[in-house]
Image (cartoon, helix red, strand yellow):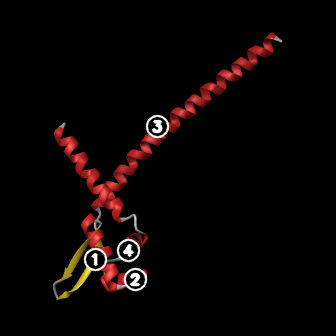
Amino acid sequence: MVTKCLLYSLMVTDLDAALAALADPTRRHVVELLRAHPRRTGELAAACGVSSPAMSKHLRILRGSGVVAEVRIDADARIHLYELRPEPFRALQAWLDQVRAYWTDQLAAFQTHVEQRLAADQEAEEAQEDRS
């Protein structure tokens, strides 16, 4: 039980960090760009229309949340590439699947209720017609 609670707490903390990082439109744009392939800071800054220091700040937040990872090229230590990490997106997908399952169940229960209510109303209407 403690392990399950701890794992849930860690997942929520990671999920919260990822959601907070992705709340900014520039950072979401960075994620879209990195879906194609890893990129340098300068490439990302130019594509997003922000300065290099601003992009560095966005990348620091994305790194801190675990959404992106910095990759160093062995041939040239000055080159820093950024790539997406799959783990935060898996956690986000797992959470969204739970939310979707909840709402699917709620909507199915509502549909059942409405169908039962319509059937009861139709029966009452038919009974009223039979009495007339």
Mark 3 and mark 4 in contact? Answer it, CB < 8 Å: no
Mark 1 and mark 2 in contact? Answer it, CB < 8 Å: no
Mark 1 and mark 4 in contact? Answer it, CB < 8 Å: yes
Are there few (<14), some (14-19), or many (20+) residues within 10 Å of tag 3? few
Mark 3 and mark 1 in contact? Answer it, CB < 8 Å: no
Going 19% across and 45% down the picture, which residue do you hit?
6
**Residue type pointed to by label 4:** Val
User: Comparing marks 2 and 3, which lies closer to the viewer?
Assistant: 2
Name the mark on residue 105: 3
Are there few (<14), some (14-19), or many (20+) residues within 10 Å of tag 2? some
Q: Find numbered disc 4 in the image and state the secondary structure of the residue it sits on.
A: helix
Q: In the orientation shown, which residue stands out farthest toward the top?
A: 131
How far across and down, in percent of the image, does residue 59 sit? 30, 74
Going 65% across and 21% down the picture, which residue do you hit?
120
Which residue in the structure is indicated by mark 2? 50
How far across and down, in percent of the image, does residue 13 sit? 26, 54
Q: Earlier in the sequence, mark 2 or mark 3?
A: 2
Which residue in the structure is indicated by mark 4? 30
Q: Find numbered disc 3 in the image and state the secondary structure of the residue it sits on.
A: helix
Name the mark on residue 82: 1
**Residue type pointed to by label 3:** Asp
Is 10 on the left-hand or right-hand side of 23? left
